[in-house]
Amino acid sequence: MTTGNARHRSAVIRVAGLVRVPRDGTPFQNRRSHDFRYEGKPGPGVVLGLLFVVIGIVLPGCGGGGSGESLTAQYQQALQIADSELQVTQLLRVAEKQHSAGDAGGVDKSLTSAADAARRIRDAGGRATALNRIGMAMARMNRPSDAKNVFREVQKTAGEVSDAEARSALLTRMAYAYEKYLGEAREAADLLDRAEQSADQIARPEGRVEALLEVAYTHFGLGHEQQAQQRVERTLENARGLEDVRKRADSLASSAAIMVKMKQADAAKALFQESQKTATEIPDPLSRAYALVHLGTKLIEADMKGAAQKILQLAEAAADQVADQSMRGPLMEKIYATRRRTTA
């Protein structure tokens, strides 16, 4: 039986894995709007924000979900978080709880405060991402007018984002929300076209493939089957045209995993086989092993764990040919970690 302290430790461990890149509930990543991690050396604001989050988990009545604590108290505590990105995340969590409780006034306050916090983020990409999350939350919570106002800010801010990969992701997620929650099909189509144009500007060839896959799968998630298929074909053309064999194998595997989600099992199976054939042609055993691990990971995502186990055996065989122990050690750890997922 799990004790209360064990649960608290588990919760703290989860909080310690904070991610700065939000996951917004889009269909292509199975993301949750409140998932985040923090990478890099934390500054004082982040440390303070984490302290509030951890205290809220460990001490009932002092934050984030203790049994006797009101949602108003949780809202007030979230306002004390110094780091704006963490504050946005906490306020969105409170807003979700208030929405479930039918507290419309509380939801309005939390979302408004979250938007204010997002606007304080200096980095244009971080600000646009945070506002995008808030706009999606507003759309889900039946606040279409507020959502559209925030999305207009996102579009304006997206123009300041120099990273084409980040810009494409922003526009893709916003397009999904516009049609899924706001019923604005024409606006969604325009945003997806702009997302595709941004994808074409991505310098990394494999990054371009990933962005186009997101556009394709978003079309599929919105019921645009013809447009989705056209984007898939374009993506495959890009993937097969990659000169780097490792990147080609990886991109084919990623495309196959998306094809599974798009209910095209036969096409996905053929792509997985093509990815395997491409990976096994990589002369360097280290690179070949990593390509096979990536393929195994995508097979697991596609719920093809038996096939993944066989691929990981090939990866381990390639790893045995890596003479440099400093390179082989981390590779074997990755293989073992991926293999554990086949039995989970």
Image (spheres, grey):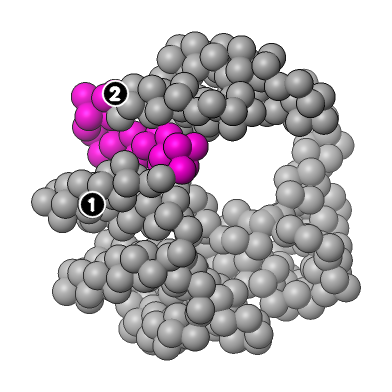
Q: Quadrant of the N terminus?
A: top right
Question: Toward the viewer: 5 or 336?
Answer: 336
Q: What's the residue at 46%, 43% (across, down)?
A: 244
User: For the magenta stretch, what is the residue range?
Assistant: 244-270
Q: Quadrant of the C terminus?
A: top right
Q: Nearer the viewer, mark 2 or mark 1?
A: 1
Question: Toward the viewer: 24 or 105?
Answer: 24
Q: Tell me which secondary structure the magenta stretch mostly adopts.
A: helix
Question: Toward the viewer: 313 or 248?
Answer: 248
Tell me: residue 85, above or below residue 235.
below
Secondary structure beneath dot 1 equals: helix
Res. 278 image quadrant: top left
Q: Which residue is mark 1?
A: 234
Disc 2 to disc 1, C-alpha distance: 19 Å
In the image, residue 54 lies at what x, y percent? 82, 56
Q: Earlier in the sequence, mark 2 or mark 1?
A: 1
Q: Is residue 343 magenta?
A: no
Secondary structure beneath dot 2 equals: helix
Q: What's the residue at 78%, 38% (across, down)?
A: 10
Q: Which residue is mark 2?
A: 269
In the image, residue 139 lies at what x, y percent? 37, 70
Q: What's the residue at 48%, 58% (across, down)?
A: 204
Q: Amino acid at mark 1?
A: Arg
Q: In the picture provided, is 329 more to the left or to the right than 108?
A: right
In the image, residue 340 lies at what x, y percent? 63, 19
In the image, residue 168 lies at what x, y percent? 40, 67
Q: In the picture provided, is 220 more to the left or to the right than 113?
A: left
Res. 83 image quadrant: bottom right
Q: Amino acid at mark 2?
A: Lys
Q: In the picture provided, is 29 more to the left or to the right than 16?
A: left
